[in-house]
Amino acid sequence: DTAVSQTPKYLVTQMGNDKSIKCEQNLGHDTMYWYKQDSKKFLKIMFSYNNKELIINETVPNRFSPKSPDKAHLNLHINSLELGDSAVYFCASSQDRNGYTFGSGTRLTVV
Amino acid sequence: AQKVTQAQTEISVVEKEDVTLDCVYETRDTTYYLFWYKQPPSGELVFLIRRNSFDEQNEISGRYSWNFQKSTSSFNFTITASQVVDSAVYFCALSEAGRGYQKVTFGIGTKLQVIP
């Protein structure tokens, strides 16, 4: 039973399209996150929700919009995809400061 | 602002050698947490250890050991008798204190290649 699951695992799409990545956790954690890992493996936080409330919103283009319908889900919607959005996107969850549990990642390729 | 520096971008060792991955951090918080994560070639991120700023005891888990020294703001990771399965990118990370949540800043990672 996967603790943090993301779908899809791979996503190939054309520039200008709109796409969503879904994330669900069954750990009962209060906080969920989206991280972006670029081609150089650098991990950068994008957003975080705590009990459905947005608490971290880093400098990210407003084409990226997170949505948290409940504390077990945090989805990422991306409008008007650009080539530079190609990356691996990781969802994670945590409780207090016990470290993250990451999903397996979504490799997004924009062509 | 917090910062994590992993000065070694790539390391190659021969199997059974010991290897130490360096991590130096900067923070203005007095309470903080340090982490190490492993990312094998398959791509998932695997949690290895968490250490809080008040606990400077070294930790050993099998072939893995961690040396936390506040005086030098370092949290180094040693793999003893390395194996091919240890080949991965290793990330050191730092969490600032929050209200029950955490914003974790990652280093750029050290790619370890263990040669058979």
Image (spheres, rainbow, N blue to C red):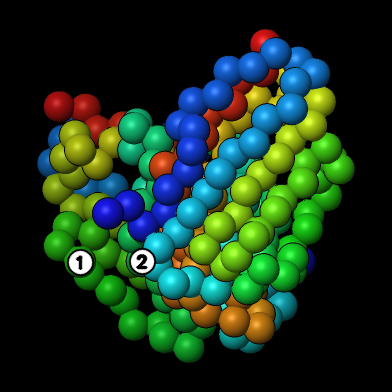
For the residue carrying disc 2, how many other residues have a C-alpha within 10 Å: few (<14), some (14-19), or many (20+)? Answer: some
* Quarter of the figure with the C terminus of chain A: top right
- The vertical placement of A96 against A35, above or below, is below
Residues at circles 1 and 2 in contact by the CB criterion of under 8 Å: yes
Residue A42's x, y, as percent?
60, 40
**Residue depicted at x 29% and y 36%:** B87
Residue B82's x, y, as percent?
19, 44
* Quarter of the figure with the N terminus of chain A: bottom left
Answer with mark 1 or mark 2, whichever residue precedes in sequence. Answer: 2
- The vertical placement of A26 against B28, above or below, is above
Nearest the camera: B106 or A100? A100
Quadrant of res B77: bottom left
Residue A84's x, y, as percent?
74, 24
For the residue carrying disc 1, how many other residues have a C-alpha within 10 Å: few (<14), some (14-19), or many (20+)? Answer: few
Residue farthest along the right direction in this orientation: A62
Position of B21 with respect to A73 (left or right) is left
- Give the label on residue B61, or none: 1
| CA distance separating discs 1 and 2 | 9 Å
**Residue depicted at x 86% and y 43%:** A62
Nearest the camera: A109 or B78? A109
Q: Is residue A14 visible?
A: yes
Q: Indicate the chain on which mark 1 is placed.
A: B
Residue B107's x, y, as percent?
57, 51
Quadrant of res B65: bottom left
Name the kind of residue labelled 1 in the image. Ser
- Give the label on residue B49, or none: 2
